[in-house]
Amino acid sequence: MASKGKALVLSSCSTSGNSHELNNQEGPLWKHVKKLDLPTTGKRGGGNRPWVCNFCGTQYIGTYYRVKGHLLKTEGTGISACKKVDADMLKVLQKLQDDFESKKKNATLSTILSFSNDEPNKKRKGDSGTQGQSKTTSREDLDRKIGRLFFSASLPFNLARNPYWKDLVTSLANSNLQGYVPPSSEKLRTTILKEERNYVDKLLEYKKFSWEENGVSIVCDGWIDNQRHPLINFFAVSIKGPIFLKVVDASGEYKNPTYMKNLFAEIVKEVGPNKVVQLITDNDMVYRTAGLSLEDEFPHIYWTPCVAHTLKLVVKTICSPPSKEQNPKANELCAWIGDLEKDAQLIINFVLNHHDALSLYNRYSNVKMLKIGETRFTSMILMITHIKLVRDSLVQMVADADWSFYRSDDEEKSQTIKKCVLDDLWWDKVDYFLEFTGPIWEMLKLIDVDEPMLHRVYEMWDNMVEKIQGIIFRHEKKDHLVDSSNFFDYIQSILVDAWKKSNTPLHCAAHSLIPMYYGKKWLSSRAGRVPPHQDSEISKHRSAYLSRVYSDTEHFHQVQEEFARFVTGVGLVGGIEAIKARDEVEPITWWVLHGASVPLLQRLALRLLAQPVTLSSRERNWSKHSQIQTIRKNKLSTSRAEDLVYVRHNLRLITKGDEKCREGASKFWDMDVEEFDIEGEPELNALNMNVDESTLPSFTHMDYNGENGGKNEEIEEVAF
């Protein structure tokens, strides 16, 4: 009955082509037996027929199933094994049967897909029609089959942007492979995964090659996954780009500074202590303590807090004014910011939580109302920016006659929203808030990139404070040379306090090695500017850094002397071309071209001017790290799980450096946009602008509560 059932299934699918030719009557092992005539009387069961084995000469009655069992010596088939088939012949026969099964599988699948694609009016072979129409139909069939894969497996539509997907399809289309069978799930997670890891390692060799000359920064960040496991990921970031190193499950230990310090030391030793310039983490107190302890073991390596994280904490402090009991003066100055946040949050929540309100909003707006994750970092800036973007739509919404419906449903909230939206003074507050926080946001976007920024932070921070001062004094109609501003003094105190906690000798040393800061063009561009060697704070920190990196007296004096020659322009570093190039070329290029006469300082400059200052662009990879949960569900071995995470992250990082993958059809390919119901390019562009703080899936971030003296007691939800 089972054989008959199989025959019926194949028959129903064999509407055309190869499946009929590849049925069991054409099995390759029939050639190694002699078929006898069917009996003319009595029972003639479905596929049963008499046959004689060509090897042993024994006669049997049965189907091809028994032929296989006899010749291939398969147990449990109800027939004895052929004793005349030796090991070598058994391999030959098995190979014939395996090839046959593979072709039959492909033919059956092909006819099933062709049958499901079949249309009543579709032209068939031999029908009239042009060659162009045939090609078009073929492409449409392939498109539908691709769609069927996406639909049946619930694959995200954004996968179609993936450059590796396009490479696969193009390779298959241009391939001459006949009878190709995709790898099994077992082969994918074993052989191919291991081969891909080796391939990725080879691709990353060119990045690692630069570590010796240009140095490398170890970037570390911790998250709590959906299963409440504290995970810590490590990246090595150099001038050639980031490399994902590993992820560590720190369950039970992530609040232990000693454990973290030993973990940091282990990573440093794996990379190579002499190649590492700095360790970057966020401002978590456990990280701070562990990082400073690491400096005791490796004096030339500095722990530096992520500058982007520091700026976000600045915004958090500004947008969360203290209570009257804590600081009455600060509360009075910044209470309007808290009120503005509450109003904006009310508008967004009301629209999103009321179906009729959302329908009314959508009537006047093509921009979707985005719910910003409550990260307590830069979420307020994003929220207020979005509110301003849809201002006209909000005004039309509350002015619509249908808005009166909410007087009975939620009168107080609807009236508050209408009052805010129609109040020009409220919008003036929106503009002022975005204006004076603008320099912070601009600096955050500038430094939050996979590019060297260590040498630019000092100057950028000064410029940011100066811009904020100008905006506040202009708003208050005051002259900063003769007047004072209590509001600016409060904002400045927050910025200065954050800088003191973030500034290290490493920042000052890198700042001192920028040739432009010693040129006339830069010095004369603004009153009061002095070269770095004349700034007491910078000079103090630079000397402290040099004394740690060059612990032996001879090298310390040599590098100090070379720095003096660089500053005063003595020798080749003071040549006509070198002086001219100070204002014209990038710092690292200048040192490559003109620094040979000061070799120690040149080597130092090539290392310091190649380092990043943030880990936020690495944080975005945690939106992909929800796969850890899937890994656990699939019960992959630890080594396979590590290989999968390693390959996944590094393939994404490799393509990030490819211009073709950042523009065109592959743009946004590595963003999990399916969570947002986002369909068009404008929404994707808006999301990309806010990628670290928007409504992407949340994980719990092990954050540091600065107001509690740095105790790691606060668990803060962070959505990128």
Image (cartoon, rainbow, N blue to C red):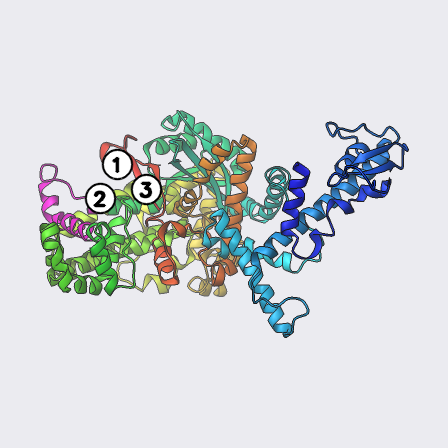
Which element is circle 2 on? Answer: helix
**What secondary structure do most residues of the magenta stretch adopt?**
helix
Is residue 342 covered in magenta?
A: yes
Q: Position of residue 222 (x, y in %)?
A: 39, 36
**Structural distance between the alpha carbons of marks 3 and 2:** 16 Å
Percent coordinates x, y for residue 418 in the rendering:
12, 58
What separation in Å lies between label 2 and label 1 (alpha carbons)?
10 Å
Q: Find disc 1 in the rendering and name its residue.
A: 706
- Earlier along the polypeptide chain: callout 2 or callout 1? 2
**In the rendered image, which residue does mark 2 sit on?**
317
User: Which amino acid, mark 2?
Assistant: Thr
Task: Name the residue at 90% across, 32% down.
Answer: 56
Whether residues under marks 2 and 1 lie with C-beta atoms below 8 angstroms apart, the answer is yes
Residue 480 in picture, x, y percent from top left: 16, 58
Question: Is label 1 in a helix, a strand or a loop?
Answer: helix
Residue 657 visible:
no
Please name which of the two marks, 3 or 1, marks the residue nearer to the observer: 3
Q: Is residue 323 left or right of residue 369?
A: left
Query: Residue at the location (86% across, 42% down)?
Result: 37
